[in-house]
Amino acid sequence: MKRSMQVGMVIVAGVVLLLLGTAPMGAKASSSASAFVHNVIYSNKIAIFSKSYCPYSLRSKRVFSELHEQPYVVELDLRDDGAQIQSVLLDLVGRRTVPQVFVNGKHIGGSDDLKAAVLSGQLLKLLEAS
């Protein structure tokens, strides 16, 4: 075998090993964040993915407070995996923005969507359905 061909095969083998060695870690982190997001959404009557400093998130949390409802809130800025969770939300609902509100497993949307659901009566119907 020629020397250049051997070097080329070694490089290809190295790249393959590098890709195989890192793929499971990335997939594991992603699936872990995905499992967490799905668990939060389907294990809680109300779930809000939020950032503690976001005025829209604060407004959404206040809506439920005024209804005497206690949402499960995930403050993404206070978690090490917050960026991963936002990526999962992007895949799940098509948005990375906060807040993202779920009631009884149904995606309501962000702050403006929540406000519209309150005004239309849809939010109360969803809350009563549980």
Image: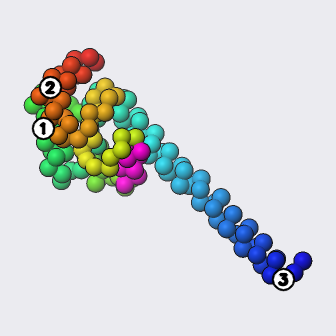
In the image, 27 versus 92, the foreground residue is: 92
| Quadrant location, the C terminus | top left
The extreme top residue here reads: 129
Report how far apart the C-alphas of labels 1 and 3 lie in the structure. 70 Å
Residue under the image location 19 percent in, 26 percent down:
123
In the image, 87 versus 75, the foreground residue is: 87
Q: Amino acid at mark 3?
A: Arg
- Is residue 119 magenta-colored? no
Q: Of marks 1 and 3, which one's residue comes earlier in the chain?
A: 3
Q: Name the spot of residue 106 as percent of width and height, x first.
A: 32, 29
Report how far apart the C-alphas of labels 1 and 2 lie in the structure. 18 Å
Point out which mark residue 62 bears: 1
Residue under the image location 9 percent in, 31 percent down:
66
Q: Amino acid at mark 2?
A: Ser
Point out which mark residue 3 bears: 3
Q: Name the spot of residue 93 as percent of width and height, x first.
A: 36, 40
Question: In terms of secondary structure, where does tag 1 sit?
Answer: helix
Q: Nearer the viewer, mark 1 or mark 2?
A: 2
Mark 1 and mark 2 residues within 8 Å of each other at the beta carbon:
no
Residue 103's image quarter? top left
Residue 86 to residue 65: above or below: below
Residue 6 to residue 83: above or below: below
Instruction: Write the start and end of the magenta stretch as one range.
Output: 83-91
Q: Could you tell whether 76 is left or right of 12 in the image? A: left
Q: Amino acid at mark 1?
A: Arg
Q: Which residue is mark 2?
A: 120
Residue 87 to residue 120: above or below: below
Residue 42 to residue 82: above or below: above
